[in-house]
Image (spheres, helix red, strand yellow):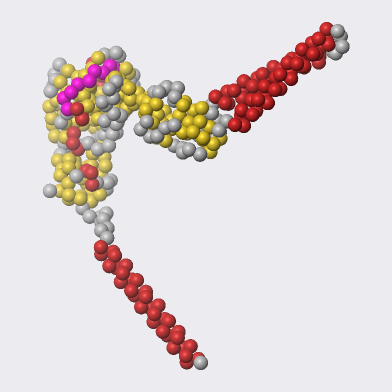
Amino acid sequence: MNKRLIIIIVVAVGLVGLTAMKLMSNQEAVKKKIYIHDSEAAVLVEETAPSIHTFESAFSYLGTFEPIRQNTIGSDASGKIIRLNIEEGDRVSQGQVIAKIDDEMLQLQLENAEVNIEGQKNDDIRYTNLAKENAVPGVQVEKTKLGLKSAEIQKKQLQKQLRSTNITAPFSGVITKKLVDLGSVIGGGSQIVEITDISSLKLTVSVPERDILKFKLNQDVSIKADIYGDRSFNGKVTNVSVQADKSHNFKVQITVKNVQQELMAGMYGSVSLVNSKSITALAIPRKALVGSSKNPQVYVIRNGKAVLTSFNAGTSDGEYIEVISGLSKTDKIVIKGQVNLQNNSNVKTK
């Protein structure tokens, strides 16, 4: 009996071992078929060094178009969303109902308040008549009148709460984010949607101290968008910063009407400026730029790695961007292959 048990155990152990070996073999075969990116592998890039470039008398400053208004709409009321009339990408008009919150309990409370007001009015009439005949003290009449005022205030509060169950668009625009779904239960202050208005756009550019006096409030300027090439749009200077940053650059904001909505928020744009003389300065090719024009960055090759580096940009002529500070002539700037890079990626050059 014991010998038979030993044989069964040995066979079971053998089967378990064979199964494990088979699973490991299958796993190795699957691994060979799956491509696993080697994060340490060097990325092939093309590089160049900043150079001295002459910007002619007509040049431009680079910026990014931003919506004239963008806001996340919240709810003052709490409860269950019983109607949701929008999807992302929908256009809405000012005052349009976006969502509806269940208001059944508030309706019942309002009916009860109206009944209470009716009773208070009847009491007021009755006690007023009795007071004229000195049948009740005057203090009782005063209490009745105060009770009526309190009931009317409660009714107004309930009416306001009822109105807040209709969530409406505060301005016309496009739904860029939908943050709840039909049937969601929300609390007061919960975010419902994000609305973006691009009927006009803001282009904010950074202007060096030497050129800031060329910009005046309400000045008409020519705007270009990268996507439309040489086509110009009319813009108006709506804000000139009164304080420079650490690099002595001033922020200038230009508003561009976008009635046909040909321009979109996030696009690169530039404002053209005619200067009396050309400027010669350190510059990099514009195609090296990554990130936002608010925080211009490039990849600088250091010790075989691509280091994401911020710099202060000046003017631009469409092909080159002036370097105010943050880069030097000896730096090696990546101008091709940035899409495959992350900060501190290993690189090799052509």
Q: Residue furthest top?
A: 132
The residue lying at 57 percent from left, 30 percent from top is: 103
On the image, the x and y values in percent for residue 182 come to: 48, 38
User: Residue 94, can we see it?
Assistant: yes
Q: Viewer-proximal residue, 208 or 167?
A: 167
**Residue 147 appears left or right of 50:** right
Q: Nearer the viewer, residue 45 or 194?
A: 194
Say which residue appears at 70% left-offset and 22% top-offset: 115
Can you say whether 1 is above or below 123 in the image? below
Does the magenta-highlighted stretch encompass residue 235?
yes
Q: Residue at x 76, y 14 (%)?
A: 124
Image height check: is 226 above or below 276?
Answer: below
Say if residue 322 shows up in the picture.
no
Question: Total of numbered circles in the picture?
Answer: 0
**Residue at the farthest right position:** 135
* Helix, strand or loop for the magenta stretch, by majority: strand
Residue 296 screen position, x and y as percent: 26, 34
Where residue 104 sits, quadrant-wise, is top right
Q: Quadrant of residue 179?
A: top left
Which stretch is magenta?
229-237
Residue 88 position in % (x across, y down) = 38, 34
Q: Tell me if 214 is positioned left or right of 146 in this view.
A: left
- With respect to residue 278, does 333 lie above or below? below
Q: Is residue 79 above or below residue 126?
A: below
Any magenta on residue 126?
A: no
Q: Is residue 249 left or right of residue 330?
A: right
Within the image, what quadrant is residue 214 found in?
A: top left
For image coordinates 80% across by 13% down, the residue present is: 127
